[in-house]
Amino acid sequence: MKKQKERPKYNIFQNILFLLKDIRQEHPILILFILTEIVLSVISPVFGIYIPKAALDLVLERAHPEQVFFTLGTFGLIMTLSMALSGMTGQGKYMLYNDMRRYYQTKLFLQSLSCDYKNVESMEGQARYQKAMGTLRGGDWSGTSILLVAAIDMAVSVLCFVIYSGIMSSLSPVMILVLVALSLISLFATRRAQGYEHSRRDEAAEYEKKLEYVIRVGSNAQFGKDMRLYHAGGWFAQLRESLIEQSTKLTNQIQNRYFASGLVNAFVLVLRDGIAYAWLIHSVASGIITISEFTLYFGAITAFSGFVERIVNSLNELNGANLQMNDMRAFLDGTDEPEPVSPLDPDSLNEYSIEFRDVCFSYEPDGAPVLDHLNLRIEAGQKVALVGVNGAGKTTIVKLLCGFYRPDSGQILIGGREAGRFRKEDRMKLFSVVFQDIYIPPFTVMENVSLCSEKDTDEGRVRDCLVKAGLWEEIAAKEAGIHTPMTRELTQGLVLSGGQQQKLLMARALYKDAPILILDEPTAALDPIAESQTYEQFHKIASDKTAIYISHRLASTRFCHRIAFLDKGRVAEEGTHEELIRKGGAYSEMFALQSKYYQNAEGGGENEEW
């Protein structure tokens, strides 16, 4: 079945009001500049067509030189003042246009940091973000700037169109209809080209996203060794050239459509002006109008044709800019699920149990279920291990629990309350999570623990957390201590080993001090002994909090009150370590395969606790 063309959510008028509202908030003086420009842009052309007629009337009437000087001088002074003021407002608003683009770039960036996580992780969400930012990347041709410029030009052109129509109606109302009809043909041709361009924007965004990825990976120092050892540089260069070639081909196809519409517009322009001037010459030759009126009408028709063309062009530009604005607003307005109508107060919770009731979930609407009628309960204060092979649904449980995604069906309860009834921000305050993907930005150690600026961080609390996580001695040995910058992305900062990074993340989780702690496979890159030590450390800091250990390896299970073995999105086995070993099921088989790797660090023999 053919996919229906998606209609823009907002029309041109709504997007203009949206822009003006933000302009009034950020730069109210720009509103004054816009209104001044409209008034001056209407006055100048009207005076421009009356000056030749007035001059010719004065000559034919043999007016006194003083009258000629006064009349033409007055016209000239008004024209000069309007042009000067117009130039001043033009310079002032140009800088503010640029600042409004920066304003929306910041707004989109901040939205990407706080929007629903599915819009960050999914390919569709990433494409939406690229399209939204694409609205602002064209400089003076960006959607926000073009919408304002075209709206001003449209207002000026329409006002002048009305004035000039009144002037020309005394000559021939039919001529006005002919000029407008021919101009509508130009409008239709250009809008066809713009519609084609917008229909290919998803492809353009896809090429841009892939090209950005290739460049980012190719210039990442972490991949430098592999690039050289495996001679992958040439391959990446070929990928880049291929993407550029495909993107260029798409651009050429779009430009060909615009070229065709340009030919139509040129033909219509010649036909339209030819008809108008032929009619005007016929009228003066037949004595229907005087010579001075001929001068007035000649200027009016020339300007009228120009204003009709400007209206057509403005409509086309407004249409194109409106499509871009809808891309931007689709990300600003459509990447957050609505908050609950009557949200629950997280402080009202008396305990922090967790329960999944018959939960189903898949990442794609028609995709295979990742969680299939999952039922799981974790009592308050319990330490529970979720184990299983890759793809069993362990990390998905964390994403659903934290509110990054919503279940397709079923319920998730926290403290006996429906999790979806908490505000997103309140819900995420309930969790401290150490993920497998390590996030250490190029800030100081202190800022990396608190994940906020140093002025908003409790220094003593950071020190205590580092001590409890077992990382204080390494940090204290540095000259700047907890003020030492980290990573080498922006500065020659501190680089931690894999085990030290895990301790830093534990300190971060301690600093947040959330009632529920989750360790989501952060030790996958560590050797078995280091992994076991990491889980021991995490068990100490978990204290009496509700804690979830997630792994496809089994180093965490000996610390837990209960183990849930996941298979195909369900809890296949559940119990203590000893109970599951005696059962002799899938958990017991996995444990038997893995236990030989977890050995006592001192003696080298198998750890007696296993």
Image (cartoon, rainbow, N blue to C red):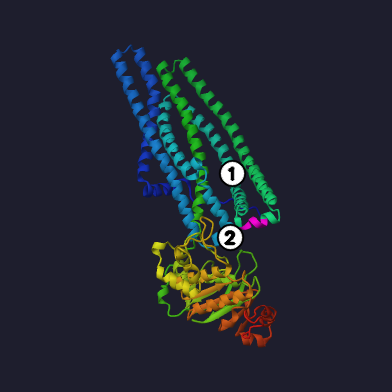
Q: Nearer the viewer, residue 327 or 391?
A: 391
Question: Is any part of residue 164 visible from this angle?
Answer: yes
- Residue 565, percent from left and from top: 63, 79
Amino acid type at mark 1: Glu
Task: Classify mark 1: helix, strand or loop.
Answer: helix
- Residue 342, percent from left and from top: 42, 70
How packed mark 1 is, by other alpha carbons closer than 10 Å (few <14, some 14-19, many 20 or more), is many
In the rendered view, does 500 fall on the left or right side of 87?
right
Q: Quadrant of the N terminus?
A: bottom right
How packed mark 2 is, by other alpha carbons closer than 10 Å (few <14, some 14-19, many 20 or more), is few
Q: Which residue is mark 2?
A: 122
- Residue 530, percent from left and from top: 60, 74
Mark identifier at residue 197: 1
Residue in the picture at 42% in, 35% down: 156
For the record, the magenta segment spans 222-226
Magenta stretch mostly in which secondary structure?
helix
Residue in the picture at 43% in, 30% down: 165
Residue in the picture at 60% in, 43% down: 196
Q: Is residue 223 magenta?
A: yes
**Sequence-earlier tag: 1 or 2:** 2
Q: Nearer the viewer, residue 411 or 607?
A: 607
Task: Classify mark 2: helix, strand or loop.
Answer: loop
In the rendered view, does 569 fall on the left or right side of 161?
right
